């Protein structure tokens, strides 16, 4: 019994992680209703069985489509709960249109709410990452300027090299200034994005 369950699990995760190609025994012993249920609870479309069909075709085995569809129909009933919709959207995962008509409107409404929260949070994180990147770039410029300053006064540095260092220092100075301007703009953007996120979080809290 354990071996059969293990084979079914391998089949269920084949598309995402692979089972090094489903073996003939896995294809023959697979519980297609359970696999369909698991795919349904993960929001995968019923067409996902095509991946299993392709994997098992090498062994002359065809998945039990009716069992898979029956399990999938049960699985989407779990996936398509409205409360789950918010969590799916907030995770950043996509929705592949698997919900039946009687559940889809409520699910999609919650999914969109969660997705919007995800997008606001992602925008804030992206801005933070850009600001941090600019600060790192400025630190790198400071280090290079320090190195140039030391080389400028070195006894073995030629006049020609010093001219090149002056030019390079000017370029670095300009870039440092550009980064400062970019950081100022990003800081303003960050403040706005932080306000947008806080406002939306308050809206969500008020709706509960």
Image (cartoon, rainbow, N blue to C red):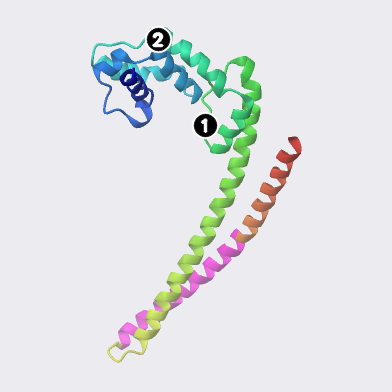
Q: Would you identify the image quadrant in which residue 120 lies? A: top right
Q: Secondary structure at mark 1?
A: loop
| 106, above or below 138, in the image | above
* Residue 155: percent from left, percent from top: 30, 92
**10 Å neighbourhood of mark 1: few (<14), some, or many (≥20)?**
few
Badge 2 vs badge 1, beta-carbon distance below 8 Å: no
Which residue: 66% across, 47% down? Answer: 197
Q: Which residue is mark 2?
A: 65
Q: Quadrant of the N terminus?
A: top left
Tell me: 129 left or right of 66: right
Q: Which residues are magenta?
A: 159-186
Q: Would you identify the image quadrant in which residue 66 lies? A: top left
Disc 2 versus disc 1: distance between alpha carbons?
A: 25 Å
Tell me: 174 left or right of 48: right
Q: Nearer the viewer, residue 18 or 100?
A: 18
Q: Would you identify the image quadrant in which residue 207 lies? A: top right
**10 Å neighbourhood of mark 2: few (<14), some, or many (≥20)?**
some
* Residue 98: percent from left, percent from top: 53, 20
Residue 40 in sight: yes
* Residue 125: percent from left, percent from top: 55, 51
Residue 45 in sight: no
Q: Secondary structure at mark 2?
A: helix
Residue 2 magenta-highlighted: no
* Residue 183: percent from left, percent from top: 57, 63
Residue 94 is tagged as 1
Residue depth check, mark 2 versus mark 1: number of the one nearer the observer: 2
Which residue: 48% across, 16% down? Answer: 72
Residue 180 magenta-highlighted: yes
Hey, which residue is sitting farthest top in the picture? 66
Hey, which residue is sitting farthest front in the picture? 1
């Amino acid at each position: 019994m354990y071996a059969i369950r293990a084979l079914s699990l391998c089949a269920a995760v084949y598309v995402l992680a692979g089972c090094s190609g489903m073996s003939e025994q896995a294809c023959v012993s697979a519980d297609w209703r359970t696999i369909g249920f698991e795919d349904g609870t993960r929001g995968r479309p019923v067409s996902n069985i095509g991946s299993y069909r392709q994997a098992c075709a090498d062994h002359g085995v065809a998945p039990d489509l009716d069992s898979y569809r029956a399990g999938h129909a049960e699985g989407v009933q779990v996936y398509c709960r409205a409360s789950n919709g918010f969590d799916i959207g907030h995770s950043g995962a996509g929705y592949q249109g698997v919900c039946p008509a009687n559940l889809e409107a409520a699910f999609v409404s919650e999914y969109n709410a969660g997705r919007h929260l995800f997008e606001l949070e992602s925008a804030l994180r992206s801005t933070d990452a850009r600001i941090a990147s600019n600060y790192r770039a400025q630190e790198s410029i400071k280090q290079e300027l320090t190195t140039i300053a030391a080389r400028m006064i070195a006894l073995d540095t030629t006049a020609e090299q010093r001219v090149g260092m002056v030019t390079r220092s000017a370029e670095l100075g300009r870039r440092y200034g550009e980064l400062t301007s970019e950081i100022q703009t990003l800081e303003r953007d960050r403040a706005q994005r932080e306000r947008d996120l806080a406002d939306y979080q308050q809206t969500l809290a008020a709706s509960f």
